[in-house]
Image (cartoon, rainbow, N blue to C red):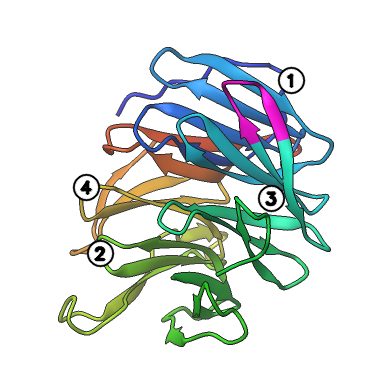
Amino acid sequence: MARRSQAGDATAGAASRVRFAPTSNNLLVSSWDSGLRLYDADEGTLRVNAESEAALLDCCFEDESSAFSCGSDGTVRRYDFHSGSQDTVGHHGDVLACIEFSLMAGQVMTGSLDKKLMLWDLKTRNICGMYILAAVARNVYFYDMRNLTTPVNEKDCPLEYPIRCLHASPEWNAYVAGSVDGAVALKYLDRGTDRDLGYAFRCHPKSRNGRSNLVPVNCIAVHPCKKTFVTGDDEGCTIAWDAHSKKKLIELPTYLGSVASMAYNHNGQLLAVASNYFLEVDKE
């Protein structure tokens, strides 16, 4: 698997999230240096560099020409790449950690350190109401987007330690979760999907001085066409797995720093990996 870097500002801060566009190979990157950058992954060129006033912790596409970001100031921002404009969708009372866009519902979903999930209607700019998955400690909760007062379901996640990352797959009717101790769990959402209702296995074990060392799984990317997924950990390790056999398919050369985010493009031919080595702490 060939590896190449995207061209851009050499002073760019550590990336917080990478996302491929819905139908093209444009790559969206949010960063701790308050910048949102759009790259052409085929040409390796920077197309858009939009600055904000806060560290950006997550981003997502609305469509090929617009995107959203959220950050440390609790603000949800929308960017129009054609006009170069950006405007505010809404605010949380605390740091915003994650953001997603539902094309079916036409809504933006955000999660914050104030322990709230909020949904925003792009036409009325009101919070409004489908289903979303949220990970809290070792549990995965299902919420109806039209009523967030209580979860409609709760799935036991077969992980012994808190969940660090969660990726839902509508095609598999399942979710894949990674924990802080280097384990991954795949859980199907109903019994009719597969006889095997799910499993968990330690996929990023490390040994130091003869003792097991806990290495968190920071991010997971599910292939859009195949029954495979990729995990990235806190020590720069990136591994592709077969979801059926739970066997390792390939391990990429180790990155210099932790793997912060990964994303497949629309047809699964490209995998974007954001590795951050800025201000890394010596773990020896």
48 up-or-down from 251: above or below: above
- Cα separation between marks 4 and 1: 36 Å
Q: Quadrant of residue 41?
A: top left
Residue that mark 3 sits on: 283
Q: Quadrant of the N terminus?
A: top left
Residue 241, percent from left and from top: 28, 54
Q: What is the crowding at mark 3: few (fewer than 14 residues within 10 Å), some, or many (at least 20)? A: few
The residue that appears at 60% across and 67% down in the rendered structure is: 128
The residue that appears at 51% across and 78% down in the rendered structure is: 143
Q: Quadrant of residue 126?
A: bottom right
- Cα separation between marks 2 and 3: 37 Å
Residue that mark 4 sits on: 225
The residue that appears at 31% across and 78% down in the rendered structure is: 189
In primary-sequence order, the first of circles 3 and 4 is: 4
Residue 281 visible, this orientation: no
- Cα separation between marks 3 and 4: 37 Å
171 up-or-down from 29: above or below: below
